[in-house]
């Protein structure tokens, strides 16, 4: 949580406000708080009782200026309004909120000024504190001089068109910057102008260029606020600790010169476009870990399915009896271990093909048979009627899809291969995996909180790529119409919020932006390829500063050497496939094992094509290997 931190007991009784003001630091509360961060740019005097604050510079302006170079001989008094008479007369109706600065001829409103009661001379505080009207700016080698007349021109610093006061170089006629950009702070904390909350906890540093060679080395990043690109010669704000870049206009969202970035900063407000009571069974993504899925949500978290169907717990016809494991003692008695990727133990459900990390579950009584089911997968509805994508026929629960590939089928919704249970229409040869059988119409996601994401087909909204992987969805996805925000179904439903992997002893969290305090380059710990943390989501361990592609993260023990060809895909291609089972095939004397091919497997004995990355049958005793299509 971010807030204003009181860094000193210094207080100020300022004439502009009825309450005493305290000096505070515009700095998020964080563990690595550094005393050196308390600089003048980030300090304000704020009121504890109401939403009122003053920049430290403005709060400490003298109440009276004597013998000022621009108006010698008379005293100038600091005021917020243009006073038409001596305040000692206390005449009503003698104040005006709009006034004109006598130096720069800019009309001001609600802007502090120095006023002479005798001559009615008024100038704003900027002109009052720049008596020579020249400056040495760090962005340019020559001294800059002020245009005294008001003008409309483009600013070399930010590239925008401004109206008002400009400074220019008399040597370099093309160099002209607006007063707002001249007075930008060297460091600031970026705020979201929509709710006043901090969007990045580190101070950003003002940079006067962003050369192409440097941008290319950082994967050509876009502005983190407006998502537009940068020009090499335009100013920007950048984070020195991690990959955060923003245009100056986006970082400040300024309306008045050097004032708007000092807006009162608080934790902000959360705005939702739906009521929780109207969505009692709402899917909130990402799921907590790899074991949690749609079925677990409906059966355990809410206790009901979104689609009505007939439940039949006795429809299974496994060749051996199943044993229920519902206590820790039952696990110890039969020496059964739960799924644990860190310990290289894999226990995948034959129904939903998700890890089994907790009791209860069923397992085949035969030690040589690895058939295992979540308890809720034994209570799946035997039928689904009026399914979203196949409403014309009833979908029937099948333990094994009737295909030519040993039960492997390609799901009609997610388009991933699967050898788990299926809901299918044999008449149309239409099959979906059991999770896609209950795919929701609406979800919410942590990457786009508080707005409902609606299910859509890419044929309708094909103009947008997924915000997580930038691929264009081929089947279905989720969409927020007000924000034009898209996620494909892989990134929305199949990427858990936390994973555990044998390459890291700590849990890894799904990240939507570059990790803060991560100054080094990003390399995947699995495939060792460099990647762009802005362009795609990734998994990250803040403790070890290690990262990995989402496609490389889910651990299939037989395939951990074989993921690099799929790094452009958001998830592991065989996410819904359970490898390791043994089969008897024709034309080979030994039993073969169903695995994913690796580089060492060479070529198929039948078609002589490469086996790496494909589903294959492999005989370990005699090094015989073929594609499953060739069996």
Image: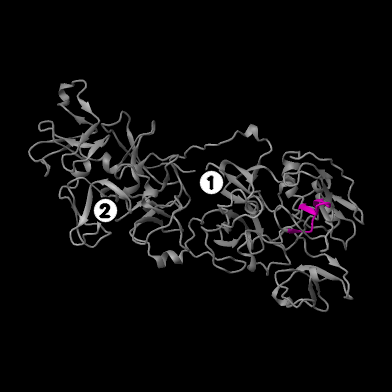
- Horizontally, residue 236 falls left or right of residue 125, namely right
Residue 542 is situated, as x and y percent measured from the top left of the image, at 55, 57
620 up-or-down from 187: above or below = below
Q: Is residue 426 magenta?
A: yes
Which of discs 1 and 2 lies nearer the camera? The answer is 1
Say above or below: 284 vs 204.
above
Residue that numbered label 1 is attached to = 484
Residue shown at 75%/61% (left/top)? 345
Image quarter of residue 372: bottom right
**Residue closest to the eye, 155 or 61:** 155
Identify the residue at the far top of this view.
92
Answer few, some or many: residues within 10 Å of disc 1's Cα (few below 14, many 20 plus, some between 14 and 19). Answer: few
Tag 1's secondary structure?
loop
Q: Residues within 10 Å of mark 2 (few under 14, many from 20)?
A: many
Q: Are marks 1 and 2 in contact (CB under 8 Å)?
A: no
Number of numbered callouts drawn: 2
Q: Residue at x 53, y 58 (%)?
A: 535
| Nearer the observer, 520 or 386 | 386
Q: Residue 539, relative to residue 453: is it above or below?
A: below
Q: Earlier in the sequence, mark 1 or mark 2?
A: 2
Q: CA distance from mark 1 to mark 2?
A: 35 Å
**Boundaries of the magenta span:** 417-432
Mark 2 highlights which residue?
177
Q: Is residue 487 magenta?
A: no
């Amino acid at each position: 949580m971010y807030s204003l931190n009181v860094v000193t007991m210094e207080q100020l009784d300022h004439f502009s406000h009825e309450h005493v003001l305290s000096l505070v630091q515009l700095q998020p509360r964080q563990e690595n708080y550094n005393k050196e961060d308390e600089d003048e740019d980030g300090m304000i005097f704020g009121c504890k009782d109401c939403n009122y604050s003053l920049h430290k510079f403005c709060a400490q302006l003298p109440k009276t200026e004597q013998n000022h170079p621009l108006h010698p001989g008379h005293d100038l008094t600091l005021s917020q309004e243009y006073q038409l008479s001596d305040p000692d007369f206390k005449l009503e109706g003698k104040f005006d909120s709009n006034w004109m600065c006598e130096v720069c001829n800019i009309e001001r409103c609600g802007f502090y000024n120095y006023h002479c009661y005798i001559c009615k001379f008024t100038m704003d505080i900027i002109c009052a504190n720049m008596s020579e009207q020249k400056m040495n700016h760090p962005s340019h080698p020559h001294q800059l001089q002020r245009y005294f007349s008001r003008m409309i021109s483009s600013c070399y610093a930010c590239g925008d068109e401004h109206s008002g006061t400009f400074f220019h170089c008399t040597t370099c006629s093309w160099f002209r910057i607006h007063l707002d950009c001249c007075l930008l702070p060297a460091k600031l904390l970026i705020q979201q102008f929509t709710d006043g909350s901090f969007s990045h906890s580190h101070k950003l540093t003002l940079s006067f260029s962003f050369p192409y060679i440097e941008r290319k080395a950082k994967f050509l990043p876009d502005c983190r606020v407006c998502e537009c690109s940068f020009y090499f010669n335009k100013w920007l704000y950048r984070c020195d600790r991690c990959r955060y870049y923003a245009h100056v206009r986006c970082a400040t969202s300024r309306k008045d010169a050097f004032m708007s970035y000092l807006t009162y900063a608080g934790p902000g407000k959360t705005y939702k476009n739906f009521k929780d009571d109207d969505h009692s069974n709402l899917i909130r993504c990402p799921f907590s870990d790899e074991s949690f899925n749609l079925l677990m949500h409906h059966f355990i978290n809410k206790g009901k399915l979104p689609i009505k169907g007939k439940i039949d717990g006795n429809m299974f016809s496994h060749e051996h009896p199943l044993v229920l494991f519902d206590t820790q003692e039952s696990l110890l008695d039969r020496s059964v271990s739960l799924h644990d990727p860190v310990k290289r133990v894999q226990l995948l459900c034959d129904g939903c093909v998700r890890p089994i990390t907790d009791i209860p579950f069923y397992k085949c009584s035969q030690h040589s048979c690895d058939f295992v089911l979540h308890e809720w997968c034994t209570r799946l509805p035997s039928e689904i009627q009026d399914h979203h994508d196949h409403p014309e026929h009833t979908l029937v629960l099948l333990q094994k899809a009737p295909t030519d590939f040993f039960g492997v089928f390609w799901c009609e919704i997610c388009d991933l291969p699967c050898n788990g249970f299926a809901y299918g229409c044999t008449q149309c040869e239409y099959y979906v995996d059991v999770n896609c059988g209950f795919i929701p119409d609406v979800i919410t996601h942590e990457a786009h909180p508080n707005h409902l994401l609606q299910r859509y087909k890419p044929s309708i909204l094909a103009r947008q790529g997924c915000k997580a992987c930038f691929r264009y969805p081929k089947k279905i996805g989720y969409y927020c119409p007000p924000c034009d925000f898209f996620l494909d179904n892989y990134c929305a439903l199949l990427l858990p919020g936390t994973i555990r992997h044998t390459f890291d002893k700590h849990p890894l969290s799904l990240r939507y932006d570059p990790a803060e305090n991560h100054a080094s380059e990003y390399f995947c710990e699995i495939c060792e390829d460099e990647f762009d943390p802005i362009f795609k989501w990734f998994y990250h361990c803040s403790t070890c500063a290690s990262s990995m592609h989402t496609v490389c993260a889910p651990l299939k023990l037989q395939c951990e050497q074989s993921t690099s060809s799929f790094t452009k895909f958001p998830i592991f291609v065989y996410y819904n496939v359970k490898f390791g089972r043994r089969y008897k095939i024709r034309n080979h004397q030994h039993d073969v094992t169903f695995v994913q091919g690796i580089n060492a497997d060479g070529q198929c004995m039948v078609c002589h094509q490469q086996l790496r990355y494909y589903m294959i049958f492999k005989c370990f005793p005699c090094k015989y290997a073929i594609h499953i299509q060739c069996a």
